[in-house]
Structures are given as C-alpha cells and as structure tokens.
Image (tube, grey):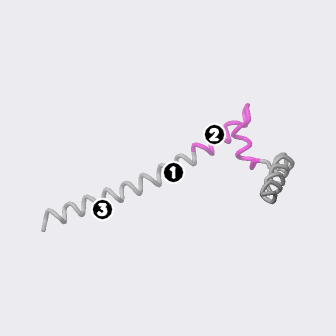
Amino acid sequence: MKKNVGFLILILVMTIFFDMAVMACPNCKDSFTNGPEAAIGESYSWSILFMLGMFMSVIGGFSLLVWTNMKKAKLNV
C-alpha cells in the first residue's frame, strides 16, 4: 500500500512540474489564439472534417454499390 502511495505522489509531483514544459504544436496553439492568426487553426479543423467526410462518403458509396449489386443478383436467381 505504501508503494502505491509513493508512486501516486511521484506521478502528482511530475505532473505539476512537467506540465509547464508540455506545449501544443504550433498549429494547435494557433487554433486557440484570437486575432488574424486564428484562421489558420480553423482552416486545419475544417480540412480535417472535410477529409473525414470524404472518406465516409467513399466508404458509404462503395457499400451502397455492393448492396445494390447483391440485391440485383438475388433477384436474378
């Protein structure tokens, strides 16, 4: 039990002291700024959403194509 408490105290101390050294990447940091540079982070956010949307559209379209072909094949049997 004492080993666990010591380990938790060590983790807490490391979190407090090393928290200041951890910084976000420049693109993520720009997304939280106010002013003319804020558009850069917002643009990255929109591009990620666009890429995810296109991926899901392609997968959905391919799945629809397979489903319709299977349905046609089932009707022809």
Q: Is residue 36 highlighted in magenta?
A: yes
Residue at image coords 71%, 46%: 27
Does residue 16 lie above or below 70 as drawn? above
Q: Residue 4 or 35: which is nearer the viewer?
A: 4
Highlighted magenta segment, given as a residue range:
24-46
Give the number of the disc on residue 42: 2
Residue named by callout 3: 66
Q: Give the position of the N terminus as an image quadrant.
A: bottom right
Q: Residue 77 or 27: which is nearer the viewer?
A: 77
Q: Give the position of the C terminus as an image quadrant.
A: bottom left
Please state the horizontal and vertical placement of residue 50, each as a whole percent of the image.
52, 47
Quadrant hosting residue 61? bottom left
Q: Is residue 71 highlighted in magenta?
A: no
Residues at badges 2 and 1 in contact (C-beta under 8 Å)? no
Does residue 49 lie above or below 75 as drawn? above
- Total count of labels: 3
Residue named by callout 1: 52
Precedes in sequence: disc 2 or disc 1? 2
Q: Amino acid at mark 2?
A: Glu
Residue at image coords 17%, 64%: 74
Precedes in sequence: disc 2 or disc 3? 2
Residue at image coords 83%, 56%: 6
Label 2, label 1: how far apart the Cα atoms are: 16 Å
Q: Secondary structure at mark 1?
A: helix
Give the number of the disc on residue 15: none
Query: With 37 as the anchor, is 45 left or right in this view?
Result: left
Quadrant hosting residue 68? bottom left
Q: Amino acid at mark 3?
A: Val
Please state the horizontal and vertical placement of residue 4, each as a whole percent of the image.
77, 57
